[in-house]
Image (cartoon, rainbow, N blue to C red):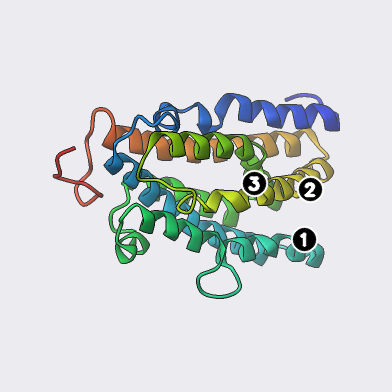
């Protein structure tokens, strides 16, 4: 980038990142949404995705810990409530555990993270570090994948209900709340980025942060596809290691 983008052009550039790089374009998602995975493969996806879900409040807390603006902290802390709830059994993490429960996975095993792929751990931990260490603008911009999630949620729920007899609307309840939470959060984060990215360097950093976050999501699906689809090399200690399909 050599010229400062107008607000409309900056938003268009951010949305273009999603159009090109969001993980709905990954082959694993086509298999998942198309009902073409085995139960074990769906279980592996839910198990590994839990690790990502469990770290989202941690990255949000890391962002808030660096934020000097009380107004921004007040707005951002709603994300912690959404994921953690205000009491045991509430929030997005609890709803994701209901999904893994519904698939028959042992809750203690899921929460322990013992069976997740190395690629999952490396990608998710890198995201938490990114938010904790980079500029506040980059940290906020990295959350803008939420601009693209509502469309994939509708596709996911419809496809999984149609394709898998072991999935119910109850087990997929996590996604219902995200249909309203994600657009709300994305609108707030986008407004922040548009307001604070006032130089060419800042705009470039915001776009790069969103690319990084798309890479984090893509890398997780790369790991799942490599381990559980093709060539099917499950790492030692990971879920399903040594088991026949």
Which is nearer the N-term, disc 2 or disc 3? 3
Pointer 1: what residue?
Answer: 72
Picture layout, residue 169 above or below residue 24:
below
Which residue lies at the image location 30% right of the left edge and 33% below the top edge? 226
**Quadrant in the picture for the N terminus:** top right
* Circle 1 residues within 10 Å: few <14, some 14–19, many ≥20: few
The residue lying toward the viewer, choosing from 26 and 70, is: 26
The reply to whether residue 76 is visible in this rendering is yes
Picture layout, residue 50 above or below residue 21:
below
Picture layout, residue 140 above or below residue 1:
below
Q: Quadrant of residue 233?
A: top left
**Quadrant in the picture for the C terminus:** top left
The answer to whether mark 1 and mark 3 are in CB contact below 8 A is no
Position of residue 198 measured from the top left corner of the image (x, y, whole percent): 83, 40
Q: Quadrant of residue 153?
A: top right
The residue lying toward the viewer, choosing from 121 and 51, is: 51
Pointer 3: what residue?
Answer: 179
Which is nearer the N-term, disc 1 or disc 3? 1
User: What secondary structure is found at the residue carrying circle 2?
Assistant: helix
Position of residue 116 measured from the top left corner of the image (x, y, whole percent): 32, 51
In the displayed structure, does residue 76 sit left or right of residue 191?
A: left
Q: Compute the Cα span from label 1 to label 3.
A: 22 Å
Which residue lies at the image location 41% right of the left edge and 36% below the top edge? 221
């Amino acid at each position: 980038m050599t010229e400062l983008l107008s607000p409309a052009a900056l938003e268009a550039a951010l949305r273009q990142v999603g159009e090109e790089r969001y993980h709905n374009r990954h082959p694993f998602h086509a298999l998942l949404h198309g009902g073409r995975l085995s139960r074990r493969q769906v279980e592996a996806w839910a198990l590994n995705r839990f690790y990502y879900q469990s770290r989202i409040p941690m990255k949000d807390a890391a962002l808030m810990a660096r934020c000097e603006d009380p107004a921004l902290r007040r707005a951002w802390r709603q994300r912690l409530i959404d994921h953690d709830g205000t009491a045991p059994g509430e929030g997005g993490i609890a709803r994701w555990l209901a999904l893994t429960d519904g698939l028959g996975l042992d809750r203690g095993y899921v929460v322990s993270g013992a069976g997740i792929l190395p690629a999952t751990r490396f990608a998710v931990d890198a995201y938490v570090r990114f938010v904790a260490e980079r500029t506040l603008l980059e940290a906020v911009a990295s959350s803008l994948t939420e601009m693209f999630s509502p469309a994939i949620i509708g596709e996911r729920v419809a496809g999984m209900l149609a394709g898998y007899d072991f999935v119910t609307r109850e087990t997929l309840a996590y996604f219902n709340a995200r249909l309203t939470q994600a657009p709300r959060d994305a609108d707030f984060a986008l407004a922040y980025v548009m307001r604070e990215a006032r130089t060419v360097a800042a705009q470039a950093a915001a776009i790069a942060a969103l690319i990084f976050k798309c890479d984090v999501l893509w890398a997780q699906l790369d790991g799942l596809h490599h381990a559980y689809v093709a060539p099917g090399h499950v790492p030692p200690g990971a879920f399903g290691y040594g088991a026949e399909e």
